[in-house]
Image: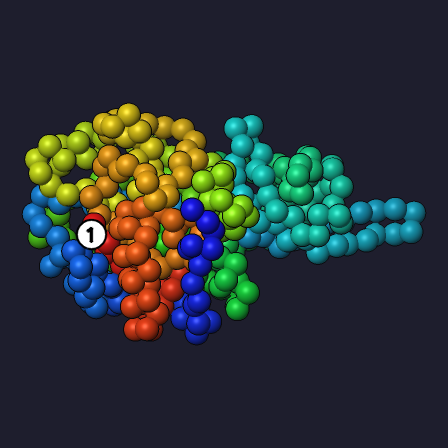
Amino acid sequence: MQLSDFDFELPERLIATRPASPRSSARLLVAQQDKVTDAHVFDLPSYFRPGDRLVLNDTKVIPARLTGYRTRHSAQGETRAKIEVTLLEPKSDGQWSALIKPLKKVAEGDVIVFPAGLSATLKQKVDGQGLVEFDASGSAFEEALAQAGAMPLPPYIAAKRAADEQDKTDYQTVFARHSGAVAAPTASLHFDEALLQALADRGVSFTHVTLHVGAGTFLPVKVDDVTTHKMHAEWGRVSTQAAQEIAETKSNGGRVIPVGTTALRLIESAAASGQIGAWEGETDIFIYPGFKFHVADALMTNFHLPKSTLMMLVSALMGYDRMRAIYDHAIASDYRFFSYGDSSLLIP
């Protein structure tokens, strides 16, 4: 299984830089049996049955991109350097791992001052990244970060435009609860309150799980033999209640349908033994063709990057040849790709 097997040509014009408005007006490609149907996200209730269960990732994206200044005083006077910090992952001691640009302009012990009275000290440099410690914690840190930070848009959007205030709404799900992600569970961005209500009226149930999506989701695969790729780890939790709800749906003959690859990876991590159970920790589960699914009966997901682990995941669910045909149809039909793009409902 070679990396090139998951490559395809994507026209630049199909990379979405803003989401559909309203959210549920995005297009939806529905793939089931040997058919592909062009629909819209607001049509979702017609594709589900009473007793089905959607699994939603309720992680909350933090405005993790900060711009500040490092100031030094010497006999020659004061010098300042503009520093960009992108938070990657919280550590157990209250510090954060972060990308710092330019890292060479900051020494260990230097303080970087951001807007809203927020500042951070560089504690250590490790493998081209920094460990930083902020001068605030808890709710005070979250409030200052909300003022000082910008949403960490994916590289393929950030290359086209800077994040703005609108992204603080657009790049957050309506059911976000638990702060910690530095990337959105993007399939969930299509849901609004009206759609959730329509699904509930249809008899569809919801289970919330939490997986804090990390920046590693955008890291390229660098090995030709994909089976040797090492996944980044992300923290997640499936509560006892969530596991019970999913197990009950399965036993009653309902379908369990994760919304997004993050929710799918988490519930399959919690069901590695074959049965879903409460689970908490870091998962580096890598799903590629040949994987045995224990929980997911279908998947709602956006359209993914060529040669990405997410292309491998959907190929594991639907079959390699089937996914090639689905993506050929999506490109020919001008579906919008990636985080702010359109969506698909994949029913193997």
Q: In screen coordinates, is 53 left or right of 77?
A: left
Instruction: Identify which residue, 95 or 103, lies in the foreground.
Output: 103
Among all residues in the image, which is located at the extreme right? Answer: 75
Who's the residue at 28% across and 62% down the image? 326
Asked which colour scheme the image uses, the reply is: rainbow
Looking at the image, residue 150 sits to the left or right of residue 56; the answer is right
Residue corresponding to mark 1: 347
Please tell me whether residue 331 is drawn above or below residue 60 in the rendered image: below
- Residue 256 makes an appearance in the image: yes
Query: Can residue 172 be seen here?
Result: no
Amino acid marked by disc 1: Ile
At 27% from the left and 57% from the top, the residue drawn is 322
x, y (%) of residue 6?
Answer: 42, 55
Residue 107 at x, y percent in the picture: 76, 41
Numbered label tally? 1
Percent position (x, y) of residue 282? 43, 31
Residue drawn at point x = 36 percent, y = 54 percent? 186
The answer to whether 123 is drawn above or below residue 336 in the figure is: above
- Please tell me how crowded label 1 is: few (under 14), some (14-19), or many (20+) other residues with Cα within 10 Å: some
Query: In the image, 78: left or right of 244?
Result: right
Q: Secondary structure at mark 1?
A: strand
Residue at (40% x, 28% y) in the render? 281
The picture places residue 274, in percent across and down from the top left corner, at 25, 28
Q: Depth check: 156 or 287 in front?
A: 287
Left or right of 234 on screen, residue 293: left
